[in-house]
Image (cartoon, rainbow, N blue to C red):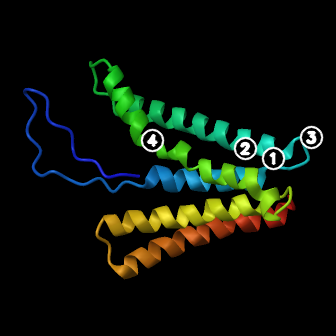
């Protein structure tokens, strides 16, 4: 996740008051939580459980990304104005961390047998929760939060991740 500057205003648009650094890690946090939920809800009883879970993670990330892009473009559209391809591309880039968040858990599913984790999804679930906490803490830090606020954001995200883990345990997957 990189920071970006505000775009240069088009002719006729007012200049921005200040150039801001972007600290929006919401897509990465949300995508990590989504990946953890997919892992927790998945059953590994298919003939090719690892491949099925990897595909499920990637496809779910892509579908939710497309839904977020559509919702933002449609929801933020100005009355009487056409949506441009440029706007869709910008929103797509902004929401892309939602898809990227499935990469590490999918990789964990792929390598888990070689790391002694077998065919279960616990390693991938741990990776998803860990990256959720990490992205939340990084976002808070980049936004200039105090150490206490950073710790609080990390703790809240850890708690949310542990709720997903508890659901997996309760369901017995």
Q: Are marks 1 and 2 in contact (CB under 8 Å)?
A: yes
What whole-number distance in Å separates the C-alpha atoms at marks 4 and 2? 20 Å
First of labels 4, 2 by sequence position: 2
Foreground mark, 4 or 2, reads 2
What whole-number distance in Å separates the C-alpha atoms at marks 1 and 2? 6 Å
Relative to 160, is 12 on the left or the right? left
Secondary structure of residue under mark 4: helix
Q: Are marks 1 and 3 in contact (CB under 8 Å)?
A: no
Q: Which residue is mark 3?
A: 47
Q: Which residue is mark 2?
A: 54
What whole-number distance in Å separates the C-alpha atoms at marks 4 and 1? 26 Å
Please give the name of the residue rendered at 53% of the width and 53% of the height, measured from the top-left corner: 30
Secondary structure of residue under mark 2: helix
Please give the name of the residue rendered at 9% of the width and 49% of the height, measured from the top-left corner: 17
Q: Which residue is mark 1?
A: 50
Q: Are marks 4 and 2 in contact (CB under 8 Å)?
A: no
Q: Which residue is mark 4?
A: 95
Relative to 5, is 145 on the left or the right? right
Secondary structure of residue under mark 1: helix
Q: Position of residue 16 (x, y in %)?
A: 12, 44
């Amino acid at each position: 996740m990189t920071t970006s500057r505000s775009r240069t205003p088009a002719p006729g648009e007012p200049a921005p008051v200040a150039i801001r650094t972007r600290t929006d890690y919401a897509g990465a946090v949300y995508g990590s939580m989504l990946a953890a939920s997919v892992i927790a809800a998945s059953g590994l009883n298919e003939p090719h459980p690892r491949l099925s879970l990897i595909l499920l993670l990637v496809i779910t990330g892509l579908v939710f990304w497309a839904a977020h892009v559509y919702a933002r473009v449609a929801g933020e559209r100005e009355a009487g104005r056409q949506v441009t391809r440029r706007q869709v591309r910008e929103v797509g880039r902004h929401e892309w961390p939602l898809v990227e968040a499935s990469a590490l858990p999918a990789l964990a599913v792929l390598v888990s047998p070689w790391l002694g984790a077998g065919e279960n999804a616990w390693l991938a679930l741990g990776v998803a929760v860990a990256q959720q906490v990490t992205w939340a803490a990084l976002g808070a830090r980049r936004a200039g939060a105090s150490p206490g606020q950073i710790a609080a954001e990390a703790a809240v995200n850890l708690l949310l991740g542990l709720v997903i883990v508890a659901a997996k345990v309760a369901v017995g997957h």
